[in-house]
Amino acid sequence: MSVSRIEQSSFGDPWSLKSFLRTLESDIFDFFVCEDESGEAVGYIIGCAVMPECEIANIAVDPAKRRMGIGRFLLESYIELMESRGADTFFLEVRRSNIPAIALYTSLRFKPSGIRKKYYKNPVEDALLMTRRTER
Protein backbone atom coordinates (compact mmCIF):
# COMPACT_ATOMS: atom_id res chain seq x y z
CA MET A 1 0.00 0.00 0.00
CA SER A 2 1.35 3.44 -0.82
CA VAL A 3 1.67 6.21 1.75
CA SER A 4 -1.04 8.13 -0.08
CA ARG A 5 -3.44 5.18 0.11
CA ILE A 6 -2.69 4.73 3.82
CA GLU A 7 -3.48 8.41 4.31
CA GLN A 8 -6.72 8.21 2.32
CA SER A 9 -7.90 5.15 4.26
CA SER A 10 -6.95 6.59 7.66
CA PHE A 11 -8.41 10.07 7.76
CA GLY A 12 -11.71 11.74 6.93
CA ASP A 13 -9.84 14.86 5.83
CA PRO A 14 -6.59 13.40 4.41
CA TRP A 15 -3.56 15.36 3.31
CA SER A 16 -3.40 15.98 -0.42
CA LEU A 17 -0.58 14.71 -2.59
CA LYS A 18 0.53 18.35 -2.89
CA SER A 19 0.81 18.57 0.92
CA PHE A 20 2.96 15.44 1.04
CA LEU A 21 5.22 16.80 -1.70
CA ARG A 22 5.62 20.16 0.07
CA THR A 23 6.56 18.28 3.23
CA LEU A 24 9.19 16.22 1.41
CA GLU A 25 10.70 19.40 -0.05
CA SER A 26 10.89 21.15 3.32
CA ASP A 27 14.03 21.26 5.45
CA ILE A 28 12.15 21.27 8.75
CA PHE A 29 10.07 18.11 8.26
CA ASP A 30 11.24 14.54 8.73
CA PHE A 31 9.32 11.83 6.87
CA PHE A 32 9.85 8.17 7.78
CA VAL A 33 8.15 5.18 6.19
CA CYS A 34 7.95 1.68 7.66
CA GLU A 35 7.91 -1.11 5.07
CA ASP A 36 7.11 -4.79 5.31
CA GLU A 37 9.39 -7.58 4.04
CA SER A 38 8.18 -7.06 0.45
CA GLY A 39 8.96 -3.33 0.48
CA GLU A 40 5.32 -2.22 0.79
CA ALA A 41 4.65 0.80 3.00
CA VAL A 42 2.74 -0.21 6.13
CA GLY A 43 2.99 3.05 8.04
CA TYR A 44 4.64 6.45 8.21
CA ILE A 45 5.35 9.34 10.52
CA ILE A 46 5.95 12.99 9.68
CA GLY A 47 7.53 15.25 12.25
CA CYS A 48 8.51 18.89 12.36
CA ALA A 49 11.45 19.75 14.59
CA VAL A 50 12.34 23.23 15.77
CA MET A 51 14.64 22.27 18.59
CA PRO A 52 14.09 21.60 21.36
CA GLU A 53 10.46 21.00 20.33
CA CYS A 54 9.00 18.49 17.87
CA GLU A 55 5.52 18.23 16.50
CA ILE A 56 4.19 14.90 15.29
CA ALA A 57 2.41 16.29 12.23
CA ASN A 58 1.06 13.01 10.91
CA ILE A 59 1.24 9.31 11.73
CA ALA A 60 -0.75 6.51 10.15
CA VAL A 61 -0.67 2.74 9.69
CA ASP A 62 -2.26 0.63 6.96
CA PRO A 63 -5.67 -0.36 8.39
CA ALA A 64 -4.94 -4.05 7.68
CA LYS A 65 -1.71 -3.81 9.73
CA ARG A 66 -2.98 -1.96 12.80
CA ARG A 67 -2.64 -3.35 16.33
CA MET A 68 0.69 -4.98 15.38
CA GLY A 69 3.01 -2.41 17.02
CA ILE A 70 3.89 -0.47 13.85
CA GLY A 71 2.58 2.87 15.14
CA ARG A 72 4.42 2.36 18.44
CA PHE A 73 7.62 1.46 16.57
CA LEU A 74 7.38 4.57 14.38
CA LEU A 75 6.67 6.89 17.29
CA GLU A 76 9.30 5.42 19.62
CA SER A 77 11.91 5.52 16.84
CA TYR A 78 11.11 9.14 15.98
CA ILE A 79 11.24 10.21 19.64
CA GLU A 80 14.54 8.41 20.19
CA LEU A 81 16.10 10.01 17.09
CA MET A 82 14.89 13.49 17.96
CA GLU A 83 16.01 13.18 21.59
CA SER A 84 19.48 12.25 20.33
CA ARG A 85 19.40 15.54 18.40
CA GLY A 86 18.40 17.55 21.47
CA ALA A 87 14.61 17.49 21.53
CA ASP A 88 12.94 17.54 24.92
CA THR A 89 9.30 18.33 24.11
CA PHE A 90 6.95 16.55 21.71
CA PHE A 91 3.37 17.40 20.91
CA LEU A 92 0.58 16.20 18.67
CA GLU A 93 -3.14 16.49 18.08
CA VAL A 94 -5.54 13.55 18.04
CA ARG A 95 -9.29 13.26 17.56
CA ARG A 96 -10.95 13.12 20.97
CA SER A 97 -12.82 10.00 19.82
CA ASN A 98 -9.66 8.12 18.74
CA ILE A 99 -9.35 6.03 21.89
CA PRO A 100 -6.76 3.54 20.50
CA ALA A 101 -4.42 6.36 19.46
CA ILE A 102 -4.87 8.19 22.77
CA ALA A 103 -4.04 4.94 24.60
CA LEU A 104 -0.85 4.54 22.52
CA TYR A 105 0.24 8.13 23.14
CA THR A 106 -0.52 7.87 26.86
CA SER A 107 1.56 4.67 27.09
CA LEU A 108 4.46 6.65 25.61
CA ARG A 109 4.15 9.35 28.31
CA PHE A 110 2.14 11.90 26.31
CA LYS A 111 -0.30 13.80 28.52
CA PRO A 112 -3.38 15.84 27.60
CA SER A 113 -2.43 19.51 27.51
CA GLY A 114 -5.31 21.27 25.76
CA ILE A 115 -8.23 21.15 23.36
CA ARG A 116 -8.41 22.58 19.85
CA LYS A 117 -12.09 23.25 19.16
CA LYS A 118 -13.45 21.98 15.84
CA TYR A 119 -9.91 21.21 14.67
CA TYR A 120 -10.90 18.26 12.49
CA LYS A 121 -13.26 18.26 9.53
CA ASN A 122 -15.29 15.43 8.02
CA PRO A 123 -16.61 14.93 10.64
CA VAL A 124 -16.07 18.08 12.66
CA GLU A 125 -14.49 17.19 15.98
CA ASP A 126 -12.29 18.70 18.65
CA ALA A 127 -8.65 17.70 18.87
CA LEU A 128 -6.98 16.69 22.08
CA LEU A 129 -3.53 18.29 22.27
CA MET A 130 -1.04 15.94 23.92
CA THR A 131 2.48 16.76 25.09
CA ARG A 132 5.46 14.69 26.18
CA ARG A 133 8.39 16.21 28.02
CA THR A 134 11.65 14.28 28.22
CA GLU A 135 12.89 13.63 31.72
CA ARG A 136 16.63 14.26 31.86
Image: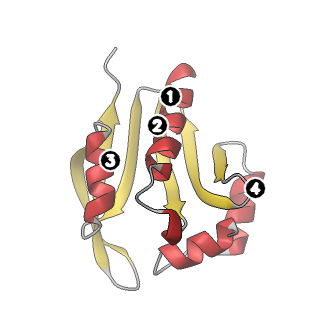
Report which residue position mark 4 lands on: 39
Secondary structure beneath label 4: loop
Mark 4 vs mark 2, foreground winner is 4
**What amino acid type is highlighted by mark number 3?**
Tyr
Proximity of marks 4 and 2: CB atoms separated by less than 8 Å: no
Q: CA distance from mark 4 to mark 2?
A: 21 Å
Q: Nearer the viewer, residue 42 or 57?
A: 42
Q: How many marks?
A: 4
Mark 1 vs mark 4, foreground winner is 4
Report which residue position mark 1 lands on: 80
Q: CA distance from mark 3 to mark 4?
A: 27 Å
The part of the image, by quadrant, that contains residue 96 is bottom left
First in sequence: mark 1 vs mark 3? 1
User: Would you call the spot at circle 2 few (<14 residues within 10 Å), some (14-19), or many (20 or more)?
Assistant: few
Proximity of marks 2 and 1: CB atoms separated by less than 8 Å: yes
Report which residue position mark 2 lands on: 76
**Image location of residue 19, percent across then percent down:** 67, 67
In the image, residue 81 sits, relative to residue 131, either above or below, namely: above
Colour logic: secondary structure
Q: Nearer the viewer, residue 113 or 61?
A: 61
**What amino acid type is highlighted by mark number 1?**
Glu
Report which residue position mark 3 lands on: 105
**Image location of residue 89, percent across then percent down:** 39, 32
Q: CA distance from mark 3 to mark 2?
A: 10 Å
First in sequence: mark 1 vs mark 4? 4
In the image, residue 7 sits, relative to residue 101, either above or below, namely: below
